[in-house]
Image (cartoon, helix red, strand yellow):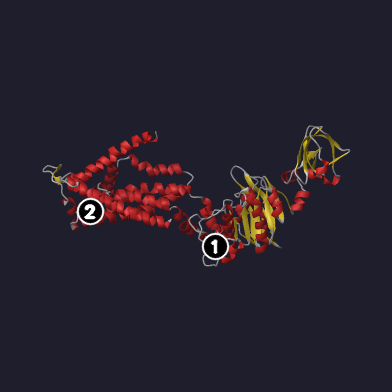
Amino acid sequence: MNAILELRAVSKHFPTHRAVDNLSLEIPRGAFFSLLGPSGCGKTTTLRMVAGFETPTSGEILLNGARIDHLPPYKRNVNTVFQNYALFPHLTVQGNVEFGKPKKSIQHVLEQVHLTGKESRRPHELSGGERQRVALARSLVMEPDVLLLDEPLSALDPLLRKEVRAELKELQRRVGVTFLFVTHDQEEALELSDQIAVMNRGVVEQIGTPQEIYQQPKTKFVASFLGAMNWIDGAGIRPECLRISSEGVRAVVVNSAFLGPFVHILAQLESGEQVRAQVAPDQAATPGETIFLSWNQRDEKRF
Amino acid sequence: MKNAFKAPAWLLMVATFFVPMAIIGVYSFLTRGGYGGIERPFTMENYTRLFDPLYGVIFARSVSIAAVATVFCLLLGFPLALFIARSAHKNFWLTLVILPFWTSFLIRLYAWMFLLRDTGLINTLFHTNLPMLYNNGAVILGLVYGYLPFAVLPMYATLERLDNTLLEAAADLGATPLRGLFSVTIPLAMPGIRAAAILTFVPCIGTYLTSDLLGGSKTILIGNLVQNQFTTARDWPFGAAASLVLMGVALGLLFMAKRRGEELL
């Protein structure tokens, strides 16, 4: 068994709703594992149960094969990077990073997150990106078996987010710690993850690599949540799989947007439904023009 | 236009603060009248009299009793404030904290006398003969009882605003609840704790009712001294000087606490 963290039939029922229902997961050692889903799907509750801030209503959580679901947070060898980072405002960068391991040298971990020289700063004197790195350093210094990240990029501005995304993946490879990453951003999950569990309404809809999840979605929810999806006669077809050809489904172009490497076309079918196609620039069509759309049978997703 | 709106506030400050303070200030440099009141000439004697060791002892006793009462208020008030801040029924508990104010403090002190005196309820109930009334302990008890709400409310206000994820972060980083309390909750609640200390210490140092009713003949505090000068002793100038010096001592102590406090933050 190579799973470092295992959830067995874990449920969390609140008086008003079931946040997580009968969830089972196995997270391989060293993996970048993402929980992806819309807000309220139970992904954060799942993370909080692993961290120890919530107690499962039923089920088991195992870390390195040993049950941890009855342990308080301070006895679990997992650490959390909070969504708002939850840095201690009364402590310096050094004070924050040393909090969990007061006697350990923190220089190495500060180097890893490029914070050397900022030891005496207070959290309010740091930029958003620096705060996030303090939160990472503070957790990594604990040498956790699993690092839990609760939407750690959502507090950053969009430009910085893409940059930090690459850094985060690089950091994970370098330190080799297993990451359990919670996000609602499908692009983020696809780019970063080794494996993704797509969650909806407290249950896991599909677990797989980014390719599997995107190319072979098992449910209609997974198909529509990851990337754009057109629905033609009950079959799902990705915009990039549609072609403009001499025959096929008849449609009238509503809008056409040139985006450099490709053109986005919004067209209306005879049924009244609108579809999106992403085609090569030489296939451009003008609004009002009648076109025929075709696709390969193997690109159809049926549920 | 802006200044016009400030006018009522200034009027109020002048009429209720500056003018009375100025009167007290002038009185403190005058000579006592034969039947109370004031007479000329101007003199410094009221202030020089205060250097008598007799009054030094009274000042020291007032400061130390107020300090002890403040410490007890903080020690008792902090856990209570923390409990209320984390309770699901905050308003219920806050109402209970404020409820005693609906009764006169004087009546509540008489209730304590009834409980504590030699033939009081406690001694009768337990068939004991403990001397619980008319000593420093009784005064401190009365002060702690009276000013505990003033300690609880500001501490509650900061604790209620405290971001709970910071405590989760502390636990996440291996801190036991006790360590979380001392390294996160208390440091972040310092502004409230300091406000609580000031709000209890200042009224305690000038108290006269509590020491008058619960204290013995040996427990004379500055408040009683001032009160005496304006009533039985009929020495208004000396009372004015004592009350101004009391104010100076209180302000000086607060200034020291504030300076130290700012370094703490």
According to the picture, the residue beneath numbered tag 2 turns out to be: B219
Query: Between residues A242 and A204, which one lies in front from this camera angle?
Result: A242
Q: Please rate how many residues cluster around mark 2, counting C-alpha atoms within 10 Å: few if below 14, some from 14 to 19, many from 20.
A: some
Describe the element under mark 1 as helix, strand or loop.
Answer: loop
Q: Position of residue B90 (x, y in %)?
A: 45, 44
Query: Between residues A120 and B112, which one lies in front from this camera angle?
Result: A120
Which image quarter is the N terminus of chain A in? bottom right
Q: Position of residue B243 (x, y in %)?
A: 23, 48
Query: Between residues B64 and A296, which one lies in front from this camera angle?
Result: A296
According to the picture, the residue beneath numbered tag 1 turns out to be: A117
Say whether residue A17 is left or right of residue B158: right
> Residue at the spot x=28%, y=41% of the render?
B17
Q: Chain of mark 2?
A: B
In the rendered structure, which amino acid carries the disc numbered 1? Answer: Gly
Q: Quadrant of residue A224?
A: top right
Which image quarter is the C terminus of chain A in? top right
- The answer to whether residue B191 is above or below residue A74 is above
Q: Chain of mark 1?
A: A
Q: Please rate how many residues cluster around mark 1, counting C-alpha atoms within 10 Å: few if below 14, some from 14 to 19, many from 20.
A: few
Q: CA distance from mark 1 to mark 2?
A: 58 Å
> Residue at the spot x=59%, y=64% of the render?
A111
Describe the element under mark 2 as helix, strand or loop.
Answer: loop
